[in-house]
Each structure stands twice: as structure tokens, then as C-alpha cells.
Amino acid sequence: MSVRIGTYNLHGLRDSRPELIKTITALRADVLCVQEMPKFGRWRARRRALADAAGMRLATPGRIGGVAVLTGPGVRVLEARGHALRVFLGLEARGLAVAVVEAGGTRLAVGSLHLDLSHPARMYHVAEAMALMERAAAPYGAAIVLGGDLNEQPHQPVWRYLTRRLADACAPGPGEGGPTFPAGRPSARIDGLFVTPGTRVVSCGTAAGVADPAAASDHLPVLAELRFGRAAGPESGTGGRAGPISP
């Protein structure tokens, strides 16, 4: 059984809320990593209201770093935490939201991450995040899925660091690995999903065909359909060839 997992930078809910809700709903994700969720001014209520409107559940607590994990119907949350990452003087506070879930008969440790524009901070935080993900996954024997806005492209060090440990679910191929930013005229691939090696990627791509993505956020969402462990079958591995995903 496959699991639909996505990542999406929501641009602080500064764009059209109706279009954002349409976009999230159209993804039909079982689990969605989100960045730039509200951090101030009734942030708890605003986060819950957005999740409810899109037919999802806010799985992770806290507001550090503006990151969160949302879950869809039928997904069981086993554990959920928010982690503060190292503070760098003069830079925005960053965090990692992690939910250990059971979806499609598989246990997954799903993390949402938003890295800084500063290269040294990005490198430090991605190593911190990987250690936290491994620590969350181990007690449950869970596969890891890390999604986020890396503020970096695949040829750069943070992306290379991650792909030495995890697999890039949208590894470039025909119709895949497309740019995610800016949503109106995407030219840079800075949002990604990284999965435990051996995961079968049924499909992965930017969900550019849903609603009006440029009105919803300044990023495009990325969505993958994944199969894990025994359910993955003999063709396990990354490199599905789905192209852009639409509902």
C-alpha cells in the first residue's frame, strides 16, 4: 500500500487563503510537511483552523521555526515533537517538527525542516536534524521521510549531505525534479523530500496542476507516492517517473 507524503512552504499564510486550502486539499496527502506556519498572534488557533479547513490534523506541537507536520484521515500519530535547533546570533530561530506515524501499515518518522539563507547555519542545522530524525525513528523501527525548504539547490552541499544518507524522492528524470520556487515562474529547486534508501518511489513531482499555486504561496508543493519495506516489492528504489502530480 502506498503513502502520499508532501512538503509545502506556505509563505506565512500571506497569500490567498482559499487558494491555499484548495491546493492542500487537492494534494490528498496522508502526511504533509509544512513550513512558514503562523508563529505569532493566535498562532495555535490559526494553525488548527488551516488544518481543519483542508481536512487534515495538526500533528506536531510548538511553533519554533514555523514548521509542522499535518496528517490526513486514517493516519495514526504515535509520537510528535518540536525541536529547537542551535541558535545563531542575528539569524532566525530554526526548528524541526517530527511526527512518528503509522500510515498504510508502515511506521514512518516524518520531519519538516526550513533551513536558513546562511550557509554555515544550514550545514549545522541539517546535521542536527538528521541526528534527531534517526533518534525519533529508532525506537519504532520507522522509515525516515524528511521534507522541507532547504534554501539550496541539489548541486549544493546541504542537498549532497542529505543524499549521502537518504534518497532524493524526486531525483531528476523525465518530468521530475522540477523547480519549486518562485511559484509563478519556478526556476530553482529548493524544496525536497528525502526518504530511507530502498523506498520505492511510485511517483514524485511538483504539484503544479492543482488550483492556482501562484496565488496560494510563493513555493510549489512537492508530493510523492511512496511504498516502504516489504510493500515496496522487487522494484524498490528511487526514480519513479510520474512528472507533475495533479489530483
Image (cartoon, rainbow, N blue to C red):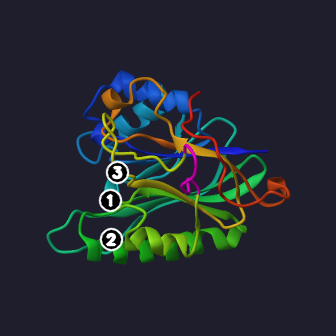
Rate crowding at label 2 as few (under 14), some (14 to 19) or many (20 or more) other CA atoms within 10 Å: many
Q: Are marks 2 and 1 in contact (CB under 8 Å)?
A: yes
Q: Quadrant of residue 218?
A: top left
Compared with 46, 117 (above or below) is: below
Q: Are marks 3 and 1 in contact (CB under 8 Å)?
A: no
User: Which residue is at a point 56% across and 35% down the rendered structure image?
Assistant: 245
Residue type indicated by callout 2: Arg
Q: Nearer the viewer, residue 64 or 180?
A: 180
User: Which residue is at a point 53% across and 27% down the rendered structure image?
Assistant: 26
Mark toward the start of the polypeptide (3 vs 1): 1
Rate crowding at label 3 as few (under 14), some (14 to 19) or many (20 or more) other CA atoms within 10 Å: some
In this rendering, position of residue 107 left or right of residue 145: right
Label 3, secondary structure: give it.
loop
Rate crowding at label 1 as few (under 14), some (14 to 19) or many (20 or more) other CA atoms within 10 Å: some
Q: Nearer the viewer, residue 59 or 121?
A: 121
Q: Could you tell me how far apart the alpha carbons at marks 3 and 1 are, in whole angstroms?
A: 9 Å
Residue type indicated by callout 3: Ala
Q: Nearer the viewer, residue 168 or 67?
A: 168
* Residue assigned mark 3: 188
User: Which residue is at a point 66% across and 73% down the rendered structure image?
Assistant: 138
The location of residue 193, given as percent across then percent down, is 52, 55
